[in-house]
Image (tube, rainbow, N blue to C red):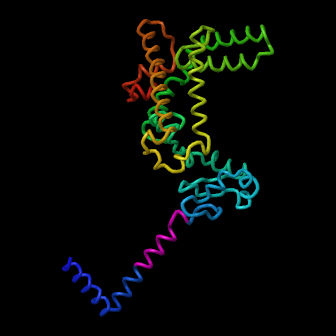
């Protein structure tokens, strides 16, 4: 320690004896700091309110009256610091169209969803997954299952669902909302798992489990549903301290088991020669080429 102190002291007095060198170092440090400041991405942010330390403008982000009345005064595009998480607000249709439609390639990223994606789905929820190599492989595999030639194999299934819808509407036209909902669910299940809704007892169970997962996903993706989305470090809290984390992990185990069961059901029918063409059968057949795991396919 004494040696280090003597070296530092010697360097300090050496700089004092050479003011030109000291000035040159100071100017270089100042120039570097100015360069970093001028090129900082934070200087290029849209206008927005000045926030408080730590929480930023979190209180304004959840204040609907401020968002509707005061926020537009800052301009078409407004920046908010929500407890360290950047948020961009688009106040006009013109700004939304310009950024999300015409420049969609530049702004096609997805926000991090800790509860809905990382905890409930192990980071594999297709519609919430960030753009990465795995997502590209998934999209290619889905395209194989839904391309023009593959879609033609669904015509028979879709025709059967359309006939069932027409018969139901003829029987009770006033219940059209219920029938259209059942029809849309049946179409999705038919082209995905070859499981159209035919009024069987097991159909109600299947539909209720899917609806429960959809409701849970909707709940967890709602703005402000969980503080962990604003304070990501909370993800590492032990389960006994965070009920929201326990619930999310329970949902993950249940839904993983459920969707793997659907996949295994398709596999069983494929081996028996009873499965019609569907997205899942195509993805199972193309698993080696797509380089997706069973969990990722399910």
Q: How many marks?
A: 0
Magenta region = 29-42
As displayed, is residue 83 above or below residue 167?
A: below
Residue 86: name its quadrant.
Answer: bottom right
Q: Is residue 16 magenta?
A: no
Residue extending farthest to the right is 174
Between 135 and 242, which is closer to the camera in this rendering? 242
As displayed, is residue 198 above or below residue 56?
A: above
Q: Position of residue 227 (x, y in %)?
A: 55, 47
Q: Position of residue 288 (x, y in %)?
A: 36, 25
Q: Position of residue 54 (x, y in %)?
A: 54, 60
Residue at (59% x, 63% y) in the render: 52
Q: Position of residue 190 (x, y in %)?
A: 57, 16
Residue extending farthest to the bottom is 17
Residue 44: name its quadrant.
Answer: bottom right
Main SS of residues in magenta = helix
Residue at (54% x, 24% y) in the render: 146
Instruction: Please state if 250 lies on the left or on the right of 53 as rendered.
Output: left
As displayed, is residue 27 above or below residue 38?
A: below
Residue at (47% x, 70% y) in the render: 36
Residue at (60% x, 35% y) in the render: 219
Between 247 and 168, which is closer to the camera in this rendering? 247
Between 288 and 192, which is closer to the camera in this rendering? 192
């Amino acid at each position: 320690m004494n040696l280090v102190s003597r070296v530092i002291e010697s360097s300090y007095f050496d700089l004092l004896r050479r003011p030109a060198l000291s000035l040159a170092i100071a100017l270089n440090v100042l120039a570097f700091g100015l360069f970093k400041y001028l090129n900082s991405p934070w200087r290029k942010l849209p206008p927005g309110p000045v926030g408080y330390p730590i929480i930023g403008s979190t209180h304004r982000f959840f204040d609907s009256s401020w968002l509707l009345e005061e926020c537009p005064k800052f301009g078409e595009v407004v920046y908010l610091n929500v407890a360290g998480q950047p948020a961009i607000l688009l106040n006009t249709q013109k700004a939304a169209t310009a950024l999300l439609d015409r420049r969609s390639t530049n702004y096609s990223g997805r926000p991090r969803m800790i509860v809905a994606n990382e905890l409930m789905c192990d980071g594999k929820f297709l519609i919430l997954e960030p753009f990465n190599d795995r997502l590209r492989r998934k999209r290619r595999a889905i395209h194989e299952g839904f391309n023009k030639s593959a879609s033609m194999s669904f015509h028979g299934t879709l025709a059967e669902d359309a006939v069932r819808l027409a018969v139901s509407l003829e029987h009770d036209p006033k219940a059209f909302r219920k029938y259209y909902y059942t029809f849309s669910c049946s179409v999705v299940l038919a082209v995905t798992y070859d499981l159209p809704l035919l009024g069987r007892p097991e159909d109600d169970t299947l539909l209720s489990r899917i609806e429960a997962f959809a409701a849970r996903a909707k709940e967890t993706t709602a703005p402000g549903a969980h503080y962990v989305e604003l304070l990501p470090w909370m993800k590492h809290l032990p389960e006994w301290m965070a009920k929201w984390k326990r619930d999310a992990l329970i949902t993950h185990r249940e839904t993983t088991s459920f969707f793997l069961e659907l996949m295994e059901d398709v596999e069983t029918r494929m081996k028996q020669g009873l499965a019609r063409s569907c997205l899942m059968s195509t993805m199972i057949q193309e698993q080696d080429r797509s380089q997706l795991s069973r969990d990722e396919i399910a």
